[in-house]
Image: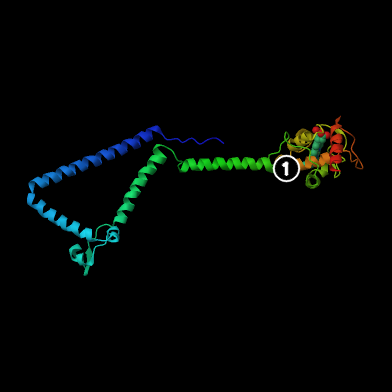
Amino acid sequence: MKSILIVVDPGMAVLIIASIILLLAILTASLVLLRALKTALKLTTPDLQLEKKEVKKEKIQKTNQQTFWQKVLGLRPMEEEEELLIDHTYDGIQELDNPTPVWFNALFYSTIVFAIGYLLFYHVFGWGMNQEQEYLAEMQAAEKQRLEFLATSGTNIDENSVELDLSPEMIISGQEIYLQNCGMCHGNQGEGMIGPNLTDEYWLHGGDIKDIFRVVKYGVPDKGMVPWESSLTPIQIAQVSNFIASIGGTNPPNPKEPQGDKHEELAAENAVAAEIEL
Ligand code: HEC
């Protein structure tokens, strides 16, 4: 199988890296700016800062009193509800300004980390296969399977690969095809009518199984022998060709006079095959 090329457009990769760097730069710049503003605020409003510090201290004390689970779930004790209440009311319904729970924040930030990892893994470095590459890989695997299947199922038999096979299944299916399609021209026993006698040792186009297969497949259109390529499958052509090979030398009644050259090989091959079967 061809190995799958992981193609990452170099222009695209540069663009992605550039945008990541730009975003990081903007983030750093805004953090620096925030710090500067905070310092400026501290210097200009010292009283406010003191007050804030106290509030913070109180808060820290309170959070230290919280249990681990209260922290994780972002729960505040009931007594604090008064402080958390937001001062607006809709039809008598009030709202608490609860902090975002830790578990939620953890989940949220982990999705960002995951997204960056994903982007780098699949789109920048191309370590994994993206949808399209996965599709192509699957198609290649399926094509390989298809070829393997065809190689074993025999549907790709042709005039070069066909072998003499006189097993009963082959001959029986071949005879069925023969009686349906060929008997009207070659005689039901192969004795010959419009078409030549197929049981004698004389052949116009060769008496080897490969020759028979070729004539059946491509026909001899000028001489009235139909090409069967489009109406029979390769395996069917192999079956009927083997049936013809099997009736060589059967001497049916009313034989048509010999045509073509003598070919003794088939009769000999038949004899050998018959011996093997015995
Ligand atoms: C319409 C009549 C017709 C039909 C149907 C027909 N054939 Fe033929 N066939 C012929 C003729 C005519 C020839 C002789 C061609 C030539 O003179 O070259 C021939 C030649 C052949 C040959 C070559 C014989 C040789 O001496 O080399 C084979 C094999 C053969 N046919 C097999 C078949 C098979 C198998 C079928 C059925 C699937 C079939 N034929 C159906 C008319 C037919």
At horizontal 36% and vertical 45% (from top left) the residue drawn is 115
Residue at 11% from the left image edge and 51% from the top image edge = 49
Residue 74: x and y in percent read 27, 59
Q: Is residue 192 visible?
A: no
Which residue, as the protein is rendered here, is positioned at the far bottom?
92
Scheme of image coloration: rainbow
Count of numbered labels shown in the rendering: 1
Quadrant where the N terminus sits is: top right
Residue at screen point 56% across, 41% down? 141
Front residue of 170/24: it is 24
Residue 105 visible in the picture? yes
**Residue behind mark 1:** 235
Q: Please tell me in which quadrant of the rendered image residue 187 appears.
A: top right
How far from the left and from the top, in percent, is residue 142?
A: 57, 43
* Residue 78 placement, left or right of 144: left
Residue 157 placement, left or right of 166 = left
Q: x and y percent of residue 45 in the render?
A: 8, 49
- In which of the image's four quarters is ligand 1 placed? top right
Which corner quadrant of the image does residue 206 belong to? Answer: top right
Three-letter code for the amino acid on which mark 1 is drawn: Ile
Q: Secondary structure at mark 1?
A: helix
Q: Quadrant of residue 181?
A: top right
Depth order, front residue of 113/242: 113
Apparent side of residue 248 relative to residue 80 in the rendered image (left or right): right
Front in this rendered view, residue 247 or 68: 68
67 left or right of 173?
left
Q: Quadrant of the C terminus?
A: top right
